[in-house]
Image (cartoon, rainbow, N blue to C red):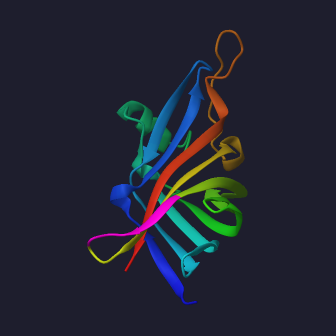
Amino acid sequence: MAAIQWTIDTTHTEIGFKIKHMMVSNVRGMFTKYTGTVETDGSDFSLAKVELDVDVASVDTNNEQRDTHLRSKDFFEVETYKTMVFKSTKVEKVDDSNFKLTGDLTIKDNTHPITLDVEMGGMVNDPYGNTRAGFTVTGKLSRKAFGLTWNGTLPGGDSILADEIAINCEIEITHR
């Protein structure tokens, strides 16, 4: 079958995350600027090649002061490191609608493999002649492994921020 090149529909996609704050609540955020492609063999996603480039300056937690801090040298250091990049290395089909997506994630010149859970929501032909597919992507990563090490200590000894970041993305891709 012929290779199909899919692109991320940025108007129907969310690249989101959450992190435990002061060990009592979660702060959620997203990245609002990104590009990505998925290459498949026909409609078979079990051999997909996925690439995602995220503009880290587009981080948005609904709090400008926090977002400015996240863009600083304490976190993403956006003046030096403009993007974070994910490139898949393997897709494992779990069942008809679930996959394990493994790839290399690079943040601030730190590259580590991560494995994400992917649930396919379905595929449809839209009224404009495009084919669309939707996915929910979830996973976890250690922020410290990627050079995002800033933290503080609470009076009881707990950290202000957890090390673990939960990834939660809603992805819609399309091709003609």
Q: Nearer the viewer, residue 128 or 109?
A: 128
Q: Residue at horizontal 65%, vertical 30%?
A: 162
Above or below: residue 105 compared with residue 60: below
Give how far across and how far down residue 78 sits, in percent. 48, 51
Quadrant holding the C terminus: bottom left
Q: Position of residue 41 (x, y in %)?
A: 59, 82
Name the residue at 58% across, 45% down: 167
Judging depth in this view, the residue of 25 and 44 nearest the camera is: 44
Residue 122 painted magenta: yes
Residue 11 shown left or right of residue 19 in the figure: left
Q: Is residue 132 visible?
A: yes
Observer-nearest of 155 and 5: 5
Q: Nearer the viewer, residue 95 or 26?
A: 95
Instruction: Indicate whether residue 133 is drawn in magenta.
Output: no
The number of discs equals 0
Residue segment shown in magenta? 121-127
The main secondary structure of the magenta stretch is strand
The residue at the point 37 percent across, 60 percent down is 10
Residue 108 seen? no
Q: Residue at x 60, y 40 (%)?
A: 166
Which residue is most to the top?
156
Left or right: residue 87 compared with residue 175: right
Residue 13 sits above or below residue 152 on the image: below
